[in-house]
Image: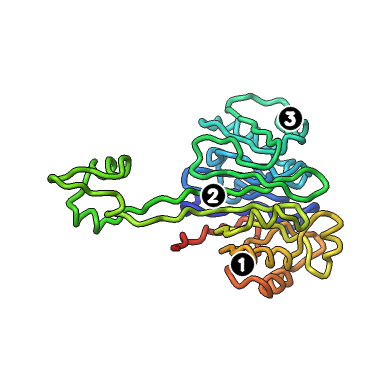
Amino acid sequence: MTTVSQRELVVLGTASQVPTKQRNHNGYLLRWDDEGVLFDPGEGTQRQMTYAGVSATHLTRIAITHFHGDHSLGLAGVVQRINLDRVPHPVDVWFPASGFEYYDRLVNATSYYRRAELRPHPIAGPGVVDVSGTPFEVRAVALSHPVETFGYRLTEPPGRRILPDRLREHGLSGPIIAELQHHGSVEIDGRTVTLDEVSEPRPGQSFAFVMDTRLCDGVNELAVGADMLVIEATFLDADAHLATEYGHLTAGQAARVAAKAGAHTLVLTHFSQRYRSLDDHLTEAEKYFTGEIHIATDLTRIPLPPRRHH
């Protein structure tokens, strides 16, 4: 199996409505410590996972933004693979409640043996998604597309980073460190040592996923301060009229959103088949966003940026 960093985006597919020889339909796996969140599995996602060295057992959650085929037709194969491989843990699936009939059809597309637990979470409206056991909060935000569409934002709460040098200074080692983290202070040799004395603030990280949408308030809400913003850039600014008509964004619009929102790393994806080369997408984005930009390419891995220090 391919070695991966603790937190990274594994790009499985980057095409919009029509796949090309170079670009498979959508599919994005966010590896976040022990979590594996699969976003928008389009056709061919199961095979792309194999090419990328991703196992079905890596998946803990599946998030679907909307029920257009290029974002959801691969769900049937992925679900059957989860069962075939007897994934030992439950897999949560988030999706717009208005598309429940499509979810049901995909999950029950053909006959197969049910050997894993799939937990559907239909989302009736914007807000915090009902999840348990995640190291981050998941928020669904309404977007503007011909069918009901939600973007997703994952936000890790801030914490504290233990400093080994400070532990040594206070003579702390072994199980007492866990006690200190749990209670916030410990007694040692007749004195009290607090967690603040041996640690420093550790900001939480955030990840935003913005698929098929025209410009709207939800796009900006998802992007604000994101450490990594994965956002569709179906068209170029020269074709902005098409983007507005069909409910999409241009590379320039996505970059302007990222700049205004103070995002750290910008990942552009979901490219129309009309563009053989994506060089112009990068050039256009660089006009407006001075941070790190990735033009997503199938089967590449993009690490989450280092934590910010405020």
Relative placement, left or right, of 62 versus 16 is: left
Residue 282 rendering spot, x and y as whole percentages? 68, 70
Q: Is residue 3 visible?
A: no
Q: Residue at x 38, y 56 (%)?
A: 201
Relative placement, left or right, of 53 versus 161 is: right
Q: Earlier in the sequence, mark 2 or mark 1?
A: 2
Q: Earlier in the sequence, mark 1 or mark 3?
A: 3
Q: Amino acid at mark 1?
A: Ile
The 10 Å Cα crowd at callout 2, few under 14, some 14 to 19, many 20 or more, is some
Please determine whether, in this image, residue 18 is positioned above or below residue 264: above
**How many angstroms separate mark 2 from mark 1 (CA)?**
21 Å
Q: Amino acid at mark 2?
A: Thr
Which disc number belongs to residue 104? 3
**How many angstroms separate mark 1 from mark 3 (CA)?**
37 Å
Which disc number belongs to residue 293? 1
Q: Residue at x 68, y 45 (%)?
A: 40
Please determine whether, in this image, residue 103 is positioned above or below residue 200: above
Residue 139 rendering spot, x and y as whole percentages? 61, 44
Q: Residue at x 86, y 61 (%)?
A: 242
* Residue designated by label 2: 155
Residue 34 rendering spot, x and y as whole percentages? 47, 43
Q: CB atoms at circles 2 and 1 under 8 Å apart?
A: no
Q: Disc 2 or disc 1, which is closer to the eye?
A: 2
Q: Is residue 113 visible?
A: yes
The 10 Å Cα crowd at callout 3, few under 14, some 14 to 19, many 20 or more, is few
